[in-house]
Image: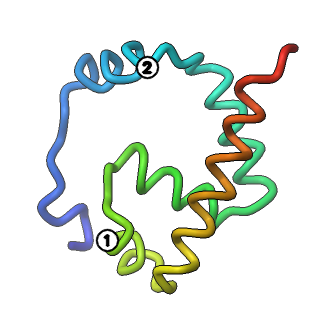
Amino acid sequence: MKRGGDYRRQPLDDVLDRYENQNLDIMALDDALFELERLDQRQAQVVQLRWFAELTVHEVVEVLNVSVSTVEQDWRTSHAFLRRQVSEEP
């Protein structure tokens, strides 16, 4: 568990294809995640674990040692923040 436990590695091309299929601006998302981390580190961790590591809410609860309601609230708040940041015109 210390070094990723039973998490699966995926080829980078597969990961990039997943995000390209969603029509995401990767650079805008990276900037938004950086800003989120500056504002609230735990919310940024929740996003990273839920979205990039594809963990369930209960798995995130175990990793961060917080309640289910905290993870759910962080997920909703950070998702709204990121959506606003990425959709804003420069």
According to the image, label 2 marks what residue? 22
Q: Residue at (52%, 71%) from the top-left corner?
A: 71
Q: Amino acid at mark 2?
A: Gln
Residue 50, picture quadrant: bottom left
Q: Residue at (68%, 35%) from the top-left corner?
A: 83
According to the image, label 1 marks what residue? 59
Horizontal and vertical percent for residue 59?
31, 71
Q: Could you tell me which quadrant the N terminus lies in?
A: bottom left
* Disc 2 to disc 1, C-alpha distance: 24 Å
- Tell me if residue 55 comes above or below residue 36 in the rendering: below
Residue 26, picture quadrant: top right
Q: Residue at (46%, 80%) from the top-left corner?
A: 68
The colour mode here is rainbow
Image mark for residue 88: none
Q: Could you tell me which quadrant the C terminus lies in?
A: top right
Q: Nearer the viewer, mark 2 or mark 1?
A: 2
- Tell me if residue 12 comes above or below residue 78 in the rendering: above
